[in-house]
Image (cartoon, helix red, strand yellow):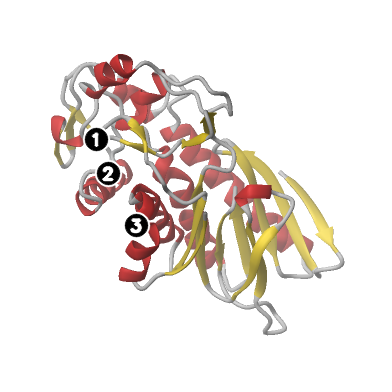
Amino acid sequence: MKLTRVPSGNYWRGAFTALGCPCEILVDTDDEAEARSVCLLSADETRRIEHKYSRYRADSVLSRLNRSNGAPQDVDGETAQLLDYAELCWRLSEHRFDITSGVLREVWRFDGSDRLPEPAAVDALLERVGWHQLTWRRPTLILPTGMELDLGGIGKEYAVDRCALMIGQRGPVSVLINFGGDLFSSGPRRDGRPWTVAIDDPRATGKQGVGTLELRRGAIATSGDAHRYLLKEGIRYSHILDPRTGWPVRDAPHSVTVLADTCTEAGMLATFAMLQGPDAEAFLKGQQATHWCVR
């Protein structure tokens, strides 16, 4: 974890990499020791979550579940909470959000090329997709042979909220947590000003924004295809897959950004909206969510 002073903003910035993205904590204090403590706390908690739920680590809880070959597995309380949440998302999204759909990555490579998988290959994988095929009765999970769980769709937002909770329990300090564009502000800065956040333009990501937001307390999450897509014959295929068909959602916005009380809630609404395709904005308006859609 690297800690630097940002004189122009009169705050400290802690930076590290985890969950496959750059992570930063902005701490509004003059006390270097306090800033370091807050940032180390966040880095340790984020890496704990990554270690526990990464599908790339053979020793993670998630990998153990994915190797269970249909045998019943009892899980701890934290994992049970995440599975409960995943089931809720599956139901609320009318089965569009499904943490068993990660196996589709075996044929989809969203690298900006024009290489689409064969329909037959996608159809074959659909036999291993579907929350309805597993059995979840807290604390016991039965995952059929060949199926996998992938918490990538909720893990980053969960980590943001966990860090926010732990920092808040430590004591009052204004922070802005930013994990790959998913953010949480604990409150206004010492002088009463909000944190200023730019909304990225996915058509020129990292180079320009579509606006700014003054964030006092709350969270922002974004779902979109700025970095992961395929392009063939003028058609852009987003990495947002519909688990019911195995194919990218058609006519979805380039990005959806949502403001909510927690990062988990913001991420859920942003992802649900993307899964609605052309009806993304209508869905968010129906939820009365503060949002930004870029098409």
User: Which quadrant of the figure contains the N terminus?
Assistant: top right
Residue type indicated by callout 1? Arg
Instruction: Tell which of 189 and 109 is nearer to you.
Output: 109
Seen at 61% across and 55% down, the residue is 178
Q: Secondary structure at mark 3?
A: helix
Residue 17, image x and y in percent?
Answer: 65, 39
Q: Which residue is mark 3?
A: 279
Q: Which residue is mark 2?
A: 96
Above-or-below relation of 30 to 269: below
Seen at 26% across and 43% down, the residue is 83
User: Mark 2, mark 3: which one is toward the viewer?
Assistant: 3
Q: CA distance from mark 2 to mark 3?
A: 14 Å
Q: Which residue is mark 1?
A: 244
Residue 110 located left or right of residue 124: right
Residue 211, image x and y in percent?
Answer: 65, 67
Question: Which picture quadrant has residue 132?
Answer: top left
Q: Secondary structure at mark 2?
A: loop
The earlier-in-sequence mark between 2 and 1 is 2
Q: CA distance from mark 2 to mark 1?
A: 7 Å
Label 1 neighbourhood size at 10 Å, few (<14), some (14-19), many (20+)? some
Contact (Cβ within 8 Å) of mark 2 with mark 1? yes
Residue type indicated by callout 2? Arg
User: Mark 3, mark 1: which one is toward the viewer?
Assistant: 3
Q: CA distance from mark 3 to mark 1?
A: 17 Å
Residue 164 located left or right of residue 104: right
